[in-house]
Image (spheres, rainbow, N blue to C red):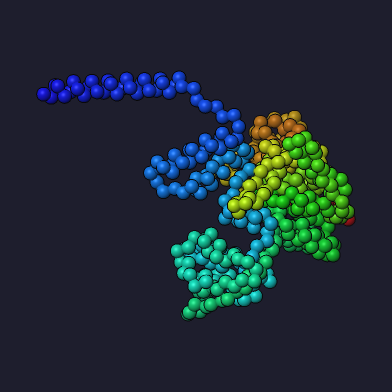
Amino acid sequence: MDKFFRRIYRLMLCILTLMMIFTSFTYANEDFKKFKNLDERMAYLKSVIEYIEKNYEGEITEEELMEGAYKGVFEALDPHSNYFKPDEYEQFAIENTGVYGGIGVTISINDGKIVVTETMAGSPAQKTGLKVGDVIRSINDQDIKQYKLKQATDLLFGEPGTEVKLGIERKEQAHILNFDIVREEIKVNPVVSKILNSNIGYIKIDTFNKNTSENVEKVLKEFQNKNIKGLILDLRGNLGGLLYEAVNVADPFIPKGPVVHIDYKNKKRETLYSKKERVNMHLVVLVNELTASASEIVAGAIQDTKSGVIVGTKTYGKGTVQHTNLMINGGGIKLTIAEYLTPSERRIDGIGIQPDIVVKNTKNINRQDIKTFNNMIEDENATLGDKGLNVYGAQQRLKFLGYEKIEITGLLDGVTSNAIKEFQQLNGLAIDGILDKKTRDKLNEKVEEMYNGEEKDLQLERGIEILNDRINNEK
């Protein structure tokens, strides 16, 4: 009997196999429909969604499927074109414009608690008495102990003129403090400024929102009133923002003329110009690999017009322009519509901006490299064209200190000679490009300082050195 069933089993298996092969062959030779227009493709999408709704084992709504389809359309485009769901677009708009309804407070999660980390000057939060370090226990009588940061942030947002109630835990208080705070229109200021060494101004721009150029202009007037001679414009970590704000920021730093060329799909070109008088300050711009888009417009215009010195590492390389639209469902789209070029018509997209002076910060450097450095123990001085172990060791140290263009070959070539001259100038040595004992000792000293000391902002230090040198040469 067992043999009989085994024969039946093998027979059925053969029949099923033949059926699968025949079915596959039939499908492979079937003529599939080719869509001729958008209406036919939309009908096909509708049939796919209906099939999923009918057969999918999990929980899914038609709205969720359609949101996925909308996003899928943009996945076929470049990485900077996106579809936003309504809640995503609302957050994008706040970040892009720098204007929202709220209480003017920054919060974070610390040990599982929602903690106030900053209150904006003149904001409702500050005027009502919220303090840095306050723990928010409730919002509008809702316990937020288990809330994620975005959930708590969303509750703080609201229309200007509306009220939000906060329950606050404060270290020196035994009971919960209640604050009723009226929301206002909050304008985010992305500009931080200070004065360094009494005669150098410093401006850091985090993003280009609607408030950026206005605040930069205020700081520049303040610096001019204080007779500041040099300026550091820090664009590191600035991923971009509004195109016209970037143009407005670049305006006072360059001569009258083109700031950026914008090439659209239809080959039409638009050129945006600077119109203001250039500020009378020596200028250094700090950039890094996270300097992108609108920031690269500013840096590129300053570099092309030789209005300042670009210091840091190569920028991100985003040279495209996006246009945003609010959609009827409350969502939005961000679509790449053009490519921008610098005043001299340089392409930036996928390329980036190479600094005039390359400097890497210590956090980007592997300290273990020092263990492989060649000792510089030869007595002879090395000049242009010489080869030797001293040159090899000097090149290792110069590269470690941020002179990125150097190739470690042991040959004192023109690039190495120029790097030695620049190092000598910045460190008060005779500027002759000769690798002598004083230069070797100073190289060892600087490497040792970097190795033993805390991480330093070498890019900022180099910028200050450049400005001090130029200001002193004026005297």
As drawn, 335 above or below 177: above
What residue sits 68% from the left and 59% below the top?
98
State the residue lying farthest toward the bottom: 174
Quarter of the C terminus within the rendering: bottom right
Query: Extreme left residue here?
Result: 1
Against 98, residue 15 (above or below) is above
Occupied quadrant, residue 25: top left
Locate residue 383: give its quadrant. Answer: top right
Quarter of the image for the N terminus: give it: top left
Tally of numbered discs: 0
Give the camera-side residue of 270 and 430.
Answer: 270
Q: Is residue 204 among the parts visible in the rendering?
A: no
Residue 309 appears in view: yes
What is the x, y in percent for residue 78? 63, 38
Question: From the viewer's perspective, is 23 left or right of 320?
Answer: left
The residue sitting at 51% across, 74% down in the picture is 167
- Residue depicted at 68% across the width and 42% down the height: 336
* Camera-side residue of 41 and 408: 41
Q: Where residue 266 sits in the image (x, y, percent)?
A: 76, 35
Q: Position of residue 436 (x, y in %)?
A: 73, 40
Residue 209 relative to residue 17: left or right: right
Residue at position x 67%, y 37% in the image: 350
